[in-house]
């Protein structure tokens, strides 16, 4: 049976990753998935510094390609195509990955495939589960928070997004206000487990609107105002973390319920609804528990990729590359990275409560 092998390069933010994924018939196998984190570089700043991120990607990308090939026990000539994240993301990082991918493709005379980072997350569950279309995607990460109906491969409809901060960004900013570590999500989750979630009543923007859109800027501002009026003791940090986590859980619960209702209006299917939760914030156990409780009430199934495939990784890019390779969807050598690249090409950019074209 014919094997398809694609190398995937991911460099859209603060993790450099190279992976080789193989498809034989309907069987998917991750031959290697090498990830180099930049947490130690950015933790001093409490967030990602684009210039430092791009330099760090450039420093390790060649080494990671060699490591991925060695781990997979194959050589370059055994690859069918080269895939690289081409957007959305930080332009400097995207350029590093795309240039590396194009160079390999040119040298090997193999197809180059530009992959949308969001498509990688949308399909990441397929690295481990043979899930059928359609399904609903909840993507929660440092740069994106949205609900998208995955109708079929390359057919996507966004039904909800954030009008300001992404959820992961809200976690990081709150952690910075509380003088916790970076990245903020795991730190807040850890502190929340020891705190009183009822101590602080925090706002839940858009919670009463019957749509699947999010807003986190007001919540972050409320945390900032409360921090300014209190001493940032260990007890305060724990209670604020717990209150923040509890508020986020309520928002996610309500908005996911709205997204399920919207999905059922659009998709007419007799199959049980499956909801894939992907992105780095999908690793949050409290959010997972909240969604699983909702699943019991709504008679739907929530599916979570393994933690290693929730965060940014080359395997999801390689898999998306395989799907595109099979359909002959290749890109020319002059393809330019797209810092803003919606998965749903008909989606509008949300700013405040206005929808802005583009």
Image (cartoon, rainbow, N blue to C red):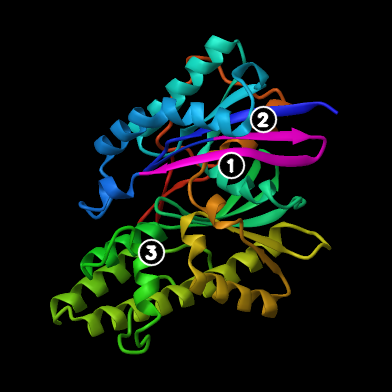
CA distance for labels 3 and 1: 22 Å
**Residue 55: where, in percent of width, then height?**
29, 31
Secondary structure of the residue carrying tag 1 is: helix
Tell me, yes or no, if residue 32 can be seen here: yes
**Residue 61: where, in percent of width, then height?**
42, 29
Marks 3 and 1 in Cβ contact (< 8 Å):
no
Q: Quadrant of the N terminus?
A: top right
State yes or no: residue 24 in magenta. yes
Q: Is residue 206 left or right of residue 18?
A: left
Q: Is residue 14 left or right of residue 45?
A: right
Determine whether 166 is above or below 196 in the image: above
Q: Nearer the viewer, mark 2 or mark 3?
A: 3
Magenta region, residue range: 19-37
> What is the crowding at mark 3: few (fewer than 14 residues within 10 Å), some, or many (at least 20)?
many
All told, the count of numbered labels is 3
State yes or no: residue 95 in magenta. no
Magenta region's main secondary structure?
Answer: strand
Residue in the foreground of this view, choosing between 350 and 105: 105
CA distance for labels 1 and 2: 12 Å
Give me the disc on residue 324. Answer: 2
Q: Which tag, 1 or 2, sits closer to the chain's start?
A: 1
* Res. 36 image quadrant: top left
> What is the crowding at mark 1: few (fewer than 14 residues within 10 Å), some, or many (at least 20)?
many
> What is the crowding at mark 2: few (fewer than 14 residues within 10 Å), some, or many (at least 20)?
some
Q: Which tag, 2 or 3, sits closer to the chain's start?
A: 3
Residue drawn at x 70%, y 34% is 22
Q: Is residue 141 left or right of residue 45?
A: right
Give me the disc on residue 316. Answer: 1
Residue in the foreground of this view, choosing between 56 and 200: 56
Tell me, yes or no, if residue 138 can be seen here: no
Mark 3 lies on residue: 185
């Amino acid at each position: 049976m014919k094997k398809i092998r694609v190398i995937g390069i991911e460099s859209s933010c603060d993790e450099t990753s190279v992976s080789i994924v193989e498809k034989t018939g309907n069987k998917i196998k991750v031959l290697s998935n090498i990830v180099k984190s930049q947490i130690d570089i950015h933790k001093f700043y409490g967030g990602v510094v684009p210039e430092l991120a791009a330099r760090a990607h450039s420093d390790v990308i060649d080494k990671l390609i060699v490591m991925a090939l060695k781990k997979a026990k194959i050589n370059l000539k055994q690859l069918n195509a080269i895939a690289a994240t081409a957007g959305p993301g930080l332009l400097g990082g995207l350029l590093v990955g795309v240039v590396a991918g194009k160079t390999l493709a040119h040298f090997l005379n193999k197809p180059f495939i530009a992959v949308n980072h969001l498509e990688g997350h949308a399909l990441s569950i397929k690295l481990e589960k043979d899930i059928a279309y359609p399904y609903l995607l909840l993507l929660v990460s440092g740069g994106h928070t949205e609900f998208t109906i995955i109708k079929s491969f390359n057919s996507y409809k966004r039904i909800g997004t954030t009008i300001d901060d992404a959820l992961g960004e809200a976690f990081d900013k709150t952690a910075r206000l509380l003088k916790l570590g970076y990245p903020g999500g795991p730190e807040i989750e850890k502190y929340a487990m020891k705190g009183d979630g009822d101590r602080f009543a925090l706002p839940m923007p858009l919670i009463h609107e019957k749509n699947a859109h999010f807003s986190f800027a007001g919540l972050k501002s409320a945390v900032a105002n409360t921090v300014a009026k209190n001493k940032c003791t260990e007890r305060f940090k724990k209670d604020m973390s717990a209150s923040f986590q509890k508020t986020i859980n309520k928002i996610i619960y309500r908005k996911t319920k709205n997204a399920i209702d919207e999905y059922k209006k659009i998709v007419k299917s007799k199959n049980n609804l499956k909801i894939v939760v992907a992105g780095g914030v999908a690793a949050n156990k409290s959010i997972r528990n909240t969604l699983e409780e909702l699943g019991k009430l709504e008679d739907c199934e929530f599916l979570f990729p393994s933690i290693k495939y929730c965060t940014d990784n080359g395997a999801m890019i390689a898999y998306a590359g395989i799907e595109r390779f099979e359909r002959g969807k290749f890109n020319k050598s002059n393809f330019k990275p797209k810092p803003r690249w919606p998965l749903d090409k008909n989606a509008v950019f949300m700013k405040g409560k206005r929808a802005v074209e583009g």
